[in-house]
Amino acid sequence: MVDGESGGLRFDANGLIPAIAQDAETGQVLMLAYMNREALAQTRASGFAHYYSRSRECLWKKGEASGHVQRVRDIRYDCDGDTLLLAVEQTGAACHTGNRSCFYRPLTHETPQAAAPATAGHSGAATADLRLLDEVYRVILQRKAQAPEGSYVASLFTKGEGQILKKILEESAEVLLASRDADRSQLVYEMADLWFHTLVLLAHHGVRPEEIAGELARRMGKQKSEYSAGGPSPDYSRKIRE
């Protein structure tokens, strides 16, 4: 069924069209849901993703209860006009399981039980995925902007850069101690603290984690003398040694 008012989109016999939500920054596919004409209209009017629940038979705003909303940057449709692609800014997890993406399970020869997502501990797909750093960074930015009462992250920004640097110094020392003691589990724990506070510092300066990844990519396969020649000045490592 072609809808002339929606740019030639093809809704099915039930008036629905599949809608894929994709992270606008990373390109990660987050979820698949369905829209009817009203959901699409609400999405375009509000700037936040709305879908149609086939099980509940009603319109719903993504994240209305959980707070994990999707701010829509762009909407595209495929060559056949029967599928939508939403580029979104995802707050928190897109999946009801707590995973960033609903597509967290690889299709392998494992049993369904073995392929289930990890929910706790220091291992498993949920904790091993480095894209989690991007999710943590987004939450840090939200705390910075909204400054909710009782938020530890908001308190760091309130106290200023000096407090953030102090925490990074403390966490760095704890990482060194854990390494010296060859305590693997403690090293993981302390390094997580260090990475977290480093992300807070990046947010303080408005530097995104992708910029760090880009710098690492620039260095790949090169000697230090090669990549440092094109790096910024001053050379802080030399200043520290001096």
Image (cartoon, helix red, strand yellow):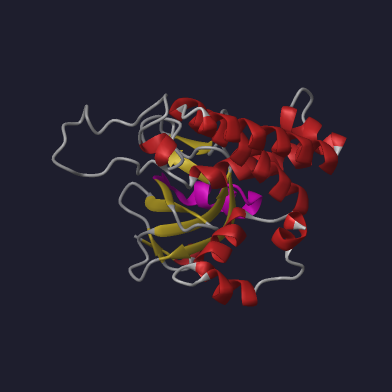
> Would you say residue 34 sits in the magenta stretch?
yes
| 205 sits to left or right of 105 | right
Above or below, comparing residue 6 to residue 68 in the picture: below
Toward which corner of the image does residue 103 lie, by quadrant?
Answer: top left
The residue lying at 36 percent from left, 31 percent from top is 55
Judge by depth and name the residue closer to the eye, 32 or 91.
91
**Nearer-the-camera pick, 20 or 26:** 26
Residue 79 in percent (x, y) is at 35, 71
29 up-or-down from 60: above or below: below
Q: Which residues are magenta?
A: 32-48
User: In the picture provided, is 130 more to the left or to the right than 205?
Assistant: left
Q: Position of residue 209 (x, y in %)?
A: 60, 54
Q: Residue furthest left?
A: 109
Out of 48 and 115, give the one closest to the viewer: 115
Q: Nearer the viewer, residue 26 or 34?
A: 26
The number of callouts visible is 0
User: What residue sits 82% from the left and 43% below the top?
Assistant: 161
- Quadrant for the C terminus, please: bottom right
The quadrant of the image that shows the N terminus is bottom left
